[in-house]
Amino acid sequence: MMNEIYSHFAGDTLPPHPSQRHVPDPNVRNSSRSVGHWTALSDWYTTLPHVILYSSFNELVVLLNRTALDDLRHVSRLMARHNARVGAQLRHDWHKILLRVAADSPNRPR
């Protein structure tokens, strides 16, 4: 599905502001320069509590060998609880935002 969405918007991007022409296009997925640039700016894992990080395949093997299955299950439960809390907060926040937007819409709910 993401490929369909991406294909739909591919080529529909606005040109960059002249001051930003040196920045790689975030929509070019087959460019290591672009992917590297934007991945370095991401914080996918640093903002997620309980995620077990490793820096190499060898470190992963060591971690898996010394971590008990019950510990991994505990981490999984903690992550699931966090995701449920964050998801509920996001739904609440977006609900409020959309109600404010709808209030100014000619098609607002009555």
Image (cartoon, rainbow, N blue to C red):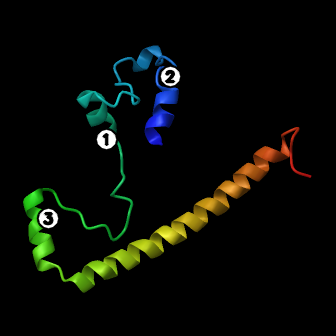
Residue 60: percent from the left, percent from the top?
14, 64
Whichever of labels 1 and 2 marks the residue nearer the N terminus, that label is 2
| Mark linked to residue 39 | 1
Of mark 3 and mark 2, the one earlier in the sequence is 2
CA gap, disc 3 and disc 2: 39 Å
10 Å crowding of disc 3: few (<14), some (14-19), many (20+): few
How dense is the environment of label 1, judged by Cα within 10 Å: few (below 14), some, or many (20 and up)?
few
Q: In the orientation shown, which residue stands out farthest toward the bottom? A: 70
- Residue at 34% over, 19% down: 22
Name which quarter of the figure residue 58 lies in.
Answer: bottom left
Image vertical order of residue 13 relative to residue 49, above or below: above
* Numbered tag placed on residue 60 in the rendering: 3
Is 109 drawn above or below residue 27 in the view shown? below
Disc nearest the viewer among 3 and 1: 3
**Residue 15 relative to residue 23: left or right:** right
At label 1, the amino acid type is: Thr
- Residue at disc 2, secondary structure: loop
* Nearer to us in this view, 21 or 109: 109
Coordinates of residue 9 in the picture (x, y in percent): 51, 27
Dot 3 or dot 1: first in sequence order is 1
Residue contact between numbered discs 1 and 2, judged by CB atoms under 8 Å: no
